[in-house]
Image (cartoon, rainbow, N blue to C red):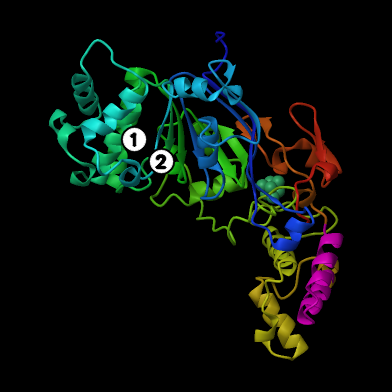
Amino acid sequence: MSGSEPLLRVEGLEKYYESESDFIDRLLGRQKKVKAVDGVSFEINEGETLGLVGESGCGKSTIGRSILQLREPTAGSVYFKGQDITTLSDSELRDLRKEMQIIFQNPQSSLNPRLTVNDIIGEALDIHGIEGDVTRDARIKDLLERVGLNASHANRYPHEFSGGQLQRIGIARALAVDPDFIVCDEPVSALDVSVQAQILNLLEDLQDELGIAYLFIAHDLSVVEHIADEIAVMYLGKIAEIGTPEELFVPPQHPYTEALLSAIPEPDPLWEGDRILLEGSVPSPIDPPSGCKFHTRCPRVIPPSDYEFEQEEWRAVMSFRHRAREEDIAVETFGDDDDALTEALRDELDLPSSLTDPEAERVVEEALRSVADEEFAAAESVLRETFETPCTTDEPALRRTDAGRVACHLFDPAYESGPTDGTRTDDGAVTGDGAAASGDD
Ligand code: SF4
């Protein structure tokens, strides 16, 4: 490994699964792929921690398992100490697992209930043929004490321990083979808040003492805020923003990072605004939104340059368009009177009684009347064709800014004067109409 080579370098990692699409799609060879991880790159240096954060289903655990080759990546490379480990044979991978370990979210289910702690930790030593110059039992007792347990606990079974103690056993098992890198897959999510802090402190102390690097996966920014040297925020299989905690929080750049930060329950000095509530849920990775995958929920989605929109109005119009596409508006519950119906629809869709821009108002009114006639496709089409935004057509690339890297057109000078056909990324590639993600939303 050269002096400048990071311990771990992930390049363009992809993990796609076959979806369980219906019979006709399979017959016609139109089976869609679930893009769990869709072109992710990052680096982790020796003795450092990268926090990987996002809602459940964003692909963060799949990344952890793909790095360890527990799941075979669809594409991309994983360099560990300078070597691409995606090309290793099974026996080479077995040897490598001495250096790369994992700590699981749920210690109850990840520890064999029929084995004593001595056997659980000893198993890892046996599998990798590790003996050393001290006896096996002495090594296990040393590991137990290192993770804050008592050496006498070695002869007990998992059911005799609390959740926090079980996670300490999981950590001791991972440490048994002297790894240089550990994937910590939501290691504190299943624990009480008070115990979470103890486990985080333990992991930090072990890192200081042993120089281990961590990929620390969490769904809550507050968990990684203090432990991570760098944090990557993920949304639907892609990195939305990456930077040091200082770069990421002061102030956050990507609208998704803002929403995650505002959701931290206790008062946090890093976020002084109101809680940002995101509409809807994370879209399906089988048919993700085109352009920026966050555009169906983004509170700052870019308005069309030809119309005058208040930001909240524009968000409501975008949500209207999305719900028309999904045919997710129950028209029959609003009665038969046309005017009363469009008024009720406005209410349902959070649209004001009249939009700021009269021409935009005319178009939205036309779309509302189409929905009233249950012509959802016509409504979606008039909104899509009239109101253009780069957020739905161009996929934002991760772009370096003064504070880390962010994938959002708001931080791309190419979009300062409104929508364009394409934009240039850090590496000179052009994204745009032809580079948009799948889906036609
Ligand atoms: S590119 Fe558009 S939709 Fe995506 S995060 Fe930025 S403003 Fe929001």
Query: Marks 2 and 1, how far apart in space?
Result: 8 Å
Q: Quadrant of the N terminus?
A: top right
Q: Is residue 173 left or right of residue 278?
A: left
Please name whichever residue, 293 or 67, is drawn nearer the observer in this view of the structure.
67
Which quadrant would the C terminus be assigned to in this image? bottom right
- At x 82% / y 59%, what residue is drawn? 387
- Residue 412 percent across, percent down from the top left: 74, 37
Q: Which residues are magenta?
A: 363-387
The amino acid on which the numbered mark 2 sits, given as a three-letter code, is Val
Q: Nearer the viewer, residue 80 or 388?
A: 80
Q: Give the answer, above or below, for where 328 lies relative to 399.
A: below
- The secondary structure that most of the magenta stretch takes on is helix
From the top left corner, tell me how far across and down residue 187 is, in percent.
Answer: 38, 40
* Residue holding disc 2: 223
Q: Residues within 10 Å of mark 1 (few under 14, many from 20)?
A: some
CB of mark 2 within 8 Å of CB of mark 1?
Answer: yes
User: Which residue has dot 1 on it?
Assistant: 200
What secondary structure is found at the residue carrying circle 2?
helix
Q: What amino acid is at disc 1?
A: Leu
Left or right? Give the position of 368 relative to 402.
Answer: right
